[in-house]
Image: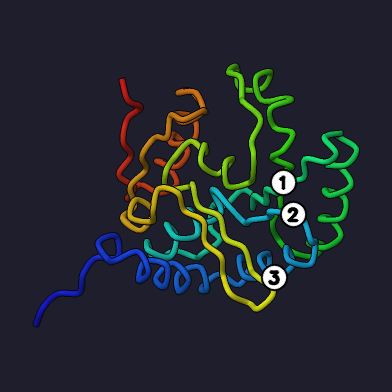
């Protein structure tokens, strides 16, 4: 009998189905996804580490929420770049996600360029969308965003595909984030998920 093809070698449409099945094993992930739609934030995705780490947990036969520090919820609202406007979204999210056993981090990607350099040491050009922000996350495996549409269909944004994610490969994405950001993240990931294949920062 022919062995089943590894998930990271499947065609992309089948990889999306595999991803859906994996993330569907996390009641917390699904509940955050459902409640996020109620916020009505423009360009909103559940993205980054919570997606990748849920996948790593399930593929490693671990509890799906183990070791996940927070659930990132980026959105894009360029009409008001004030901290006060973003804080209103954060306060609304605190009410929406009240009672869940996780922290949900809400961030307006339209204003990231205002503080990024002071925080990370490199300038960040203004983003044009949430998708443009996801393009620059430090690892290709975490450059994934998921949104629940009004018809309950999942919209999956994965600019570098899903093969690294499903293949447990952590590959640096030097588009924006500096080397130390990547290396700080993978240092923790290596301890938490030792089965990962972590690739070094390019010379």
Residue pushed farthest bottom?
A: 1
Residue pushed farthest left?
A: 1
Q: Which mark is residue 100?
A: none
Q: Mark 1 and mark 2 in contact (Cβ < 8 Å)?
A: yes
Viewer-proximal residue, 160 or 181? 160
Q: Mark 3 and mark 2 in contact (Cβ < 8 Å)?
A: no
Which residue matches tag 1? 76
Using the numbered discs, state the Cα–Cα distance from disc 1 to disc 3 in whole angstroms.
19 Å
Which residue matches tag 2? 42
Expressed as whole percent of the image width and height from the top left, the position of residue 68 reads 57, 52
Expressed as whole percent of the image width and height from the top left, the position of residue 141 reads 42, 48
Estimate how packed mark 3 is, as few (under 14), some (14 to 19) or many (20 or more) residues with alpha carbons within 10 Å: some
Q: Is residue 56 left or right of residue 126?
A: left
Query: Is disc 1 placed on a helix, strand or loop?
Result: loop
Q: Is residue 57 left or right of residue 145?
A: left
Q: Quadrant of residue 78?
A: top right
Q: In the figure, 31 relative to 143: above or below?
A: below
Using the numbered discs, state the Cα–Cα distance from disc 2 to disc 3 in whole angstroms.
15 Å
Q: Residue at x 71, y 61 (%)?
A: 101
Q: Is residue 194 left or right of residue 1?
A: right
Say which of marks 2 and 3 sits in front.
2
Q: Residue at x 52, y 61 (%)?
A: 156
Expressed as whole percent of the image width and height from the top left, the position of residue 55 reads 44, 60
Q: In the figure, 18 relative to 202: above or below?
A: below
Query: Which callout, 1 or 3, points at the residue further toward the start of the chain?
Result: 3
Query: Which callout, 2 or 3, points at the residue further toward the start of the chain?
Result: 3
Q: Quadrant of the N terminus?
A: bottom left
Q: Residue at x 74, y 33 (%)?
A: 111
Query: Is disc 3 placed on a helix, strand or loop?
Result: helix
Q: Quadrant of the C terminus?
A: top left
Say which of marks 1 and 3 sits in front.
1
Q: Which mark is residue 34?
A: 3
């Amino acid at each position: 009998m022919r062995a089943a093809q590894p998930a990271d070698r499947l065609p992309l449409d089948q990889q999306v189905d595999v991803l859906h099945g994996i993330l569907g094993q996390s009641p917390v992930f699904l509940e955050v996804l459902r409640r996020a739609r109620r916020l009505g934030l423009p360009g909103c995705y559940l993205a980054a580490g919570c997606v990748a780490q849920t996948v790593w947990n399930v593929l490693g036969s671990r509890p799906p929420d183990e070791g996940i520090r927070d659930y990132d919820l980026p959105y894009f609202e360029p009409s008001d770049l004030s901290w006060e406007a973003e804080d209103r979204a954060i306060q609304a999210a605190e009410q929406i996600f009240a009672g869940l056993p996780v922290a949900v981090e809400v961030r307006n990607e339209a204003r990231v360029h205002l503080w990024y350099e002071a925080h990370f040491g490199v300038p960040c050009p203004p983003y044009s969308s949430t998708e443009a922000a996801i393009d620059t996350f430090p690892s290709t495996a975490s450059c994934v965003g998921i949104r629940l549409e009004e018809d309950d269909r999942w919209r999956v944004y994965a600019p570098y595909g899903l093969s690294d994610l499903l293949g447990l490969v952590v590959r640096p994405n030097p588009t924006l984030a500096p080397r130390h950001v990547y290396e700080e993240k993978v240092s923790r990931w290596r301890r938490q998920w030792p089965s990962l294949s972590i690739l070094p920062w390019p010379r």
